[in-house]
Image (cartoon, rainbow, N blue to C red):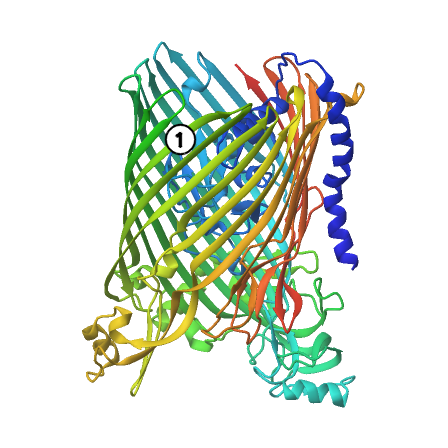
Amino acid sequence: MQKTSFQLAKHSILGACIATIISGQASAQEKPIEEIVVEGFRSSLLKSKDLKRDAIGTRDSIVAEDIADFPDLNLAEALQRVPGVTITRDGGEGRRIAIRGLDSNFSLVQLNGMDVLGNTDTAMDSRDQGSRDRAFDFNLFASELFNRIDVAKSYSASDDEGGMAGNVSLRTAKPFDKEGFNSALSVQAGDNEYTDDIAPRTAFLISNTWGNWGALGSIAYSERDTIEQGPNTYRWRTTARRGLGDTIIGENVSDSDLQALQEGTVIAPRGNRLSVWENTQERLGITTAFQYKGDVFDVTLDALYGELNNDRGEYHINPRNNNGSMPYGSDVTMSNVNLRALPTNDAGITHEVLGADFSNSVFNVESRAQDVETTFEQVVLSGNFNLNQYVTLHGLIGYESSELETYSLKVYTETRGDFRYDYSDIMSPRFTYGQDMTDPSQFWLQEIDVRKRFNKTENSTAKFSADIALDDRDTLRVGVAAKQLENSTAQGDQNNRLRDLQGDDFGGAFGDLADIAAGIDDDLFRVQSNNDQLDWAVVNPRQFVNSTYVQNALARTGQSLDVATTLGDSVNGVEEETLNAFIEYEWQRDIGSMALRGNVGLRYYTTDTDTQVSDEDGNFIGSIDNTYDGVLPALNVSLEPTDDIVLRLSLSQNITRPSYSSLSDELEIEVDNDDVTMESANPTLDPYLSTNFDLGAEWYFADNAGYVALAFYRKDIEDYIVTLDRTVSLAETGINLDTLRALSGDNSITLDTPVNVQRPVNAEDATLEGVEFTLQRDFDFLPEPFNNLGMMGNFTYADGEVNYYPNGETLETAAFPNLSEHSSNVTLYYETDNWGVRVAQSYRGSYIQRTSDGSDEEFRGFKPTTFFDMSAFYQVNDQLKITLEGSNLTNEADQQYSSKAGFQRAYNITNSGRTIYLGASYQF
């Protein structure tokens, strides 16, 4: 009950303002209407409001002032203030978005009119590192490069298909956005409480127009160091999974507790790890735009280049014995065990471990260096041609590519000692070590692992459409488009190198790590001191593997760390070609004193895919083709019963195509006598299909003082993709018969041979619905100086469930992945001509991230978070402005949980620290 009250209190910041604001509205409407000229943040809110009001469907927009002048490190953080949009974070900044409870795969993101599929990476396996999907990572670009973002939540036939959750349109600046010569420079210096170095951030824009011609260029560059740190468990598991083995039982372990431990009905943390993720990030973005704008036609050439480089260091320490990752094993003594009894549950778990002491436990230290490079390139040529007073032609051709390259080097070292863990606070564990862990002389080498991964996506697009004016109020739109997308990935590994080797393999008697460093390089080791609970000795991986010691050992054992030899010539890849066409009729009518606007249309699409399939060793197996098509209807109606009220209704269908990892991934095949088992992706998947219903009402206040909006939405989803176990014939799998015979060595296999296949399939239906409430209001009804106050806020409720099938068996029905039932945003601002302050709160409720087979966990997800940001400015003169920005002011923790038997327990808890930026901008 306490938790629920606290969450409701967060939303009360929005609710407490409503009565006052609405009560002031009546008097505000009685004032005579006059021309109001507004600059700054209020001006941007006014533009966003007008864009929302003029739209036929449900749309929210963010314009330049919102994007550039709020403490948003990237576009995801700007978008989190849109109703119904939530974000995931990585490295202390936003990374991906979810719209109306559907995760980032279900949003179609377009940049200058083209689908954009730029992927970066996350440092953490628990956050789906290296995922291959259709989501866009918004941390690829700085927010300063863009002057407008539109989020369309209802669908029209003239919109590109693919975004069941919504379409996000990103737009870079154009020279004719503001005619004449314009130039602006902004510089900032940032500081994070966990890091030592100052983080520079700068952006520059220059543009000019000469008659019908214009040119623009902009650049944004930033550097920053980040640290995330905290404890993690990488799941909980029952003692039945491994047993206590030869663990010595010490004092203060009752007979009943020992019996429960031995019977395997106790759940305990699988790992008890302290972690630090360090990162040095460089982000570069460059845009250019060239325009010709005449009376009859206009042409725009846009080019964009983006680069995001991450130099990461990752360090972990945890007890890890010969009994897997749990701290039991031979020569280990367990004592002072604290068990908590659990209510009766279907999993048969009777207790959970809250604390225990371990003597002579083996400690494992992982030191990882990781280089991650993302590059993005786009060129788009677009234009409009007024053929005559009735017909306007539109065209676009473009190409873009996104490449992600990851190199990971891990060095594992070990030592022994005493250890205690304490889970009295189940989401905030404490670990205590019985000795100094900063001395490298206590450690020895365990192994070295290397991995290299490539992922590349290319997109070529051509679109042509025509607007045909039937009369002053009716327009017919028709269009065709062609897209070609290619996604490919390759991975190479060298694992378990120099694992547990001794003696002559290292050129002599094997001592401790301090002996390795002696006389070679003082930089091989250092003390990691960025975790709140412990300092410990770690390896500098790059220097270590290049040391004479390691190179000699590799030579003596005939081993290699060269991953190029394991990449092979084949890759897992998908080639996708889509053709589509649409027809849309748009109308305007007056019904008495009411204005009625709307559009209705159909969109046809056909998609061909060619999927390359490789086995788990990287050997190319073959290609599988698939084709699907469909017709998507759409209707959007907007009615204005009065000058200040807008009612909206939308009915449509839309699709989302399967992720690349669902279409193409490593194929694992096992043949045991007559039993054939296969685990694979599914190149023959159909897209998700959603039938959408939207209903909304908006009341716009007098004197441009703001608006209040309420929207209801529902999505009935068919062909939802889940992973199932099914027995099918070999012919149905699409795998070549000769290939399978060669892999298995069994020539008796035929196309009719039954195969037990675990793979994603279109098997489920689901429903998602929710309500959005938005309020934006200037407090102009208050007496001076309080009339400079204002607020904008929104609250979203979302509800939807789907069946989960981990390992092919029904687990249970639960919420959609990444769906937060409640989310809200509130911004309070005070702004004059010379200075202003804004404080923003962003709340996201708990959500499920993924499911598991139930052996260790059933669900994994995140606890609720509340982030506070602020921004202030002082306008020195017409050209110079000083800014102060702060993000994550309360150092909010990301609490990732692991759920088993109906209880949520700590999985990964991280803090990234508060960040402050001081800067200045100058308009030339």
Residue at 76%, 85% (x, y): give it.
253
Residue at 47%, 29% (x, y): give it.
597
**Which residue is tagged 1?**
586
Say which quarter of the image contains residue 884. Answer: top right
Q: Is residue 681 left or right of residue 203?
A: left
Res 85 seen here? no
Amino acid found under the numbered disc labelled 1: Glu
Q: In this view, does 262 lie above or below 705?
A: below
Q: In this view, does 623 lie to the left or right of 756?
A: left
**Label 1 element class:** strand
- Residue 258 lies, in percent from the top left, at 71, 87
Residue at 78%, 32% (x, y): give it.
20
Question: Outermost residue, top direction?
Answer: 211
Q: In this view, does 334 lie to the left or right of 271?
A: right
Q: Nearer the viewer, residue 751 or 158?
A: 158
Res 768 seen here? yes
Q: How crowded is mark 1: few (under 14 residues within 10 Å), some or many (20 or more)?
A: many
Say which quarter of the image contains residue 553. Answer: bottom left
Q: In this view, does 808 lie above or below 532?
A: below
Q: In this view, does 634 lie to the left or right of 910?
A: left
- Residue 133 lies, in percent from the top left, at 41, 53
- Residue 86 lies, in percent from the top left, at 57, 46
Q: Which of 484 and 874 is in front in this view?
A: 484
Residue at 61%, 26% (x, y): give it.
644
Say which quadrant the N terminus sits in: bottom right
Say which quarter of the image contains residue 259. Answer: bottom right
Q: Nearer the viewer, residue 764 or 874?
A: 764
Q: Nearer the viewer, residue 667 or 195?
A: 667
Query: How many numbered marks appear?
Result: 1
- Residue 740 lies, in percent from the top left, at 24, 75
Q: In this view, does 469 lie above or below 247?
A: above
Question: Outermost residue, front direction?
Answer: 592
